Image (cartoon, helix red, strand yellow):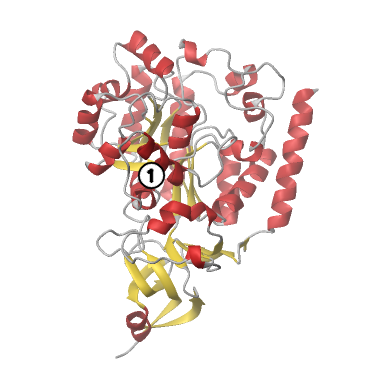
Amino acid sequence: MHKKTVDTVIINGDIFTGDRSQPHYRLGAIAISDGIIVGIGREQEILSAYDATRKIDAQGALVHPGFIETHIHSTGMAYHGAPFNPQAGTASKVNYQSMKAATDPEITAAYTAAAACSMLQRGFTLYFEAGTVFETDAFAETLTKCGLRGMVTAPWGWDDMSSDVLDGLNETLMRRAPADARRVIDQCKHELARNKDDSALVRGYVGLCSGSGSTDELIGEAVRLATDSNAIFWAHQAFEPDDDAGERRRFGDAGTIRMHRLGALGPNTTLAHMNMLDEQDVELILAMKPGLSWCPNNAMAYRITPPHKCWFPHLYRNGASVSLGVDTIITHPMGIAGLMSLYLSRLVGDGLNFSDPFYMQTIDAARNAGLGDRLGSLAVGKRADVVIREARDITHYSWRDDMGILLSLSSSMIPVHTVLIDGKVVMEKGRLTTMDQDEILAEALRQRDLLADRIST
């Protein structure tokens, strides 16, 4: 049989595809051409069909589609372990709000590059920035240089600051992100222009900061823009009791019901948090099928779930598309959300299947980012975003060949050896190949310390 020549073949892999119809190949191989997966299956079958310019030996290690983080506030990654936390307020000059508000393009570029390294080292290939980066062009340019995918929207998308929950915000933050619908919509249009290049690593989406900070008019216009642009509409929603109660007082209803009334509850919508739900909300979600970005670690840290009921396991079992986000990276390490989703679901007596977080961070996450047709699984026709873990000890080898349980239980603790994005090797032996990783870290630390010194004086 005449063999086809491709760019790359990955061989000798313990491959978890993210495709429930064919979840696993051991030993497996993947053929890649022009950034697209053209073949995947048993190693012998792939090698009999393809020759390759480059052959990558996974050495029996776990291979999986790149994880997708669907809710993270970018600047917080540089402040992990800082002597302040998101709930500390603005009593001191150096705090979470003041540090986020005082960035510039140079600072954002430094932070973004360092964040890209951190994401890749944990097996994440798409970085969903949840509306806090002011210098979006610097963010996009830097991620592209690093070779990592990203999603970006208007910073602080709001037009109504009358909610008590939004009181006491930093003055610099409010000056840079005034509560103005036109600012938000115009900035979203700027980000959506990135999508004209179908091969762009960084794409725009339509995002709002919170339901309580957005009028009905802004939500309606944002949904129309997303629909007309074939992009997702995304919003923080139903995070905690005070926010939920304030939205009900001002608008007559809140959360899911309000979004439904405004035409914002459908398959092209992804709502983050959604901790404050009742049975009527759940029925609407299952009927209308929006995506949900669950942040289990934050729900526990803010003492929201429990005592409030956690509906995510029920929703997931009944067909809702649930992805995971770490959200507040200051106090929660990157990669913890999968394990925390298992812990929280068991804590509330409605345990997830051990493999569920793997799918939440791959195929479901791709769908919730509006990219389910091109990312999220290792399948013919999809972009070649592939993670190869290290094979170092007995805990890093799968036993069963059905579900990807190991990737759910300990993915953030299994070192990453190689990452391909669009078929290009962007990390090898745990090191970024596109830029100098040591210089990136040094510059991010320098910029962080200079910013803190400047704010404190």
Q: Position of residue 33 (x, y in %)?
A: 41, 72
Q: Residues within 10 Å of mark 1 (few under 14, many from 20)?
A: many
For residue 444, above or below residue 155: below
For residue 412, above or below residue 245: below
Count all numbered tags in the image, as a single digit. Answer: 1
For residue 4, above or below residue 414: below
235 relative to 314 in the view: left or right: right
Taking the spot 34% from the left edge, 31% from the top edge, the residue there is 310
For residue 186, above or below residue 363: above
Asked if one can make out residue 201 in the rendered structure from this viewpoint, the answer is no
Taking the spot 45% from the left edge, 18% from the top edge, the residue there is 159
Q: Position of residue 249 (x, y in %)?
A: 35, 8
Q: Which amino acid does label 1 sit on?
A: Ala
Q: Is mark 1 on a helix, strand or loop?
A: loop
114 relative to 202 in the view: left or right: right
The quadrant in which the N terminus is found is: bottom left
Asked if one can make out residue 93 in the rendered structure from this viewpoint, the answer is yes
The quadrant in which the C terminus is found is: top right
Residue under circle 1? Answer: 369
Q: Where is residue 276 in the image (x, y as percent from the top left)?
A: 35, 24
Taking the spot 75% from the left edge, 49% from the top edge, the residue there is 442
